[in-house]
Image: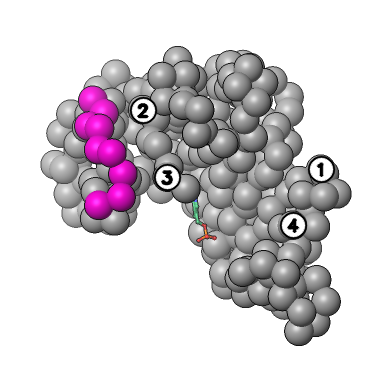
Amino acid sequence: MKPVLVEPSIDTYNIDPDKIEAAITSKTKAIVVVHLYGKACDMDPIIALCKKYNLKLIEDCAQSHGATYKGKHTGTFGEFGAFSFYPTKNLGALGDAGAVVCNDIALDKIIRRLRNYGSDIKYYNEVVGYNSRLDELQAAFLSVKLKRLDEINAHKRKLASIYLNNLNADFVKPVVDKDYFDVYHIFNIRHEKRDDLKEYLLKNGIKTEIHYPVSPSKQKHCRESLIIIIFLSVKKTSATTLSLPISFFHTELDE
Ligand SMILES: *Cc1c(COP(=O)(O)O)cnc(C)c1O
């Protein structure tokens, strides 16, 4: 199996639906979308392509717990939605954890088997699987935190609105659109003098991050295993992107 990269949109950083069709061949099995930074991908044209070419749809929802597109939650569009509960995610465990959602009994069975050494019955292995069960303690923590996910997302959306209302035109801000309910896992801006800005903020006690310093096509493993295409939008984003602080623990300054 060989993944083929498709260029993201420079506006949302999500997969550009207009560029998917050119990457589809007779060997294509599925489209994998990543709802990056807490914004859903533009799903209508992607679903249309899946239907047209009879492809499966897999959603990476690691940054999009609770995000919606036209009122529908990410993770509910495709055959599978993969969620990460890594501690820094909008819904985070106290250690590593994750889950896959699906709405098909046969597919559910496959996923349950894969996470448990490829086994349905103890000591009998049907396929090569993984040790990927969700630890019970983490599940208990997550059951408590899940009830507060809407509160966590609302808080992040409030912080995002402060940035959106106060950052001037030197900053390329995240796109806001009525069809998208964004949960701002990351609040990403672009700035021409990104490195100077990052340093200036750090000197003033504000730590920022770069998501991501190395794009997939430049990762060593990908350079060896993928056909490399240099995407202009990625080049531009890599040089200017900066993530501003936006966690549940940040509060508004009282004035
Ligand atoms: C965090 C993250 C992952 C990985 O999640 P793990 O729980 O560490 O496996 C995958 N995709 C995206 C977009 C992520 O943000």
Q: Does the residue labelled 3 lie within 8 Å of ligand 1?
A: no
Q: Which of marks 1 and 3 is nearer the N terminus?
A: 3
- Choose the circle earlier in sequence order: 4 or 1: 1
Q: How crowded is mark 3: few (under 14 residues within 10 Å), some or many (20 or more)?
A: few
Mark 2 vs mark 1: which is more N-terminal? 2
Q: Mark 1 points at which residue?
A: 103
Q: What element carries label 4?
A: helix
Q: Distance between the residues labelled 4 and 1?
A: 12 Å
In percent of width and height, residue 46 lies at 58, 22
Magenta stretch, main secondary structure, is loop
- Say if mark 4 contacts mark 1, CB within 8 Å: no
For the residues bearing labels 1 and 3, Cβ distance under 8 angstroms? no
- In the image, 141: left or right of 171? right
Question: Mark 2 — residue?
Answer: 7
Identify the disc placed on residue 12.
Answer: none
Q: Does the magenta stretch include residue 153?
A: no
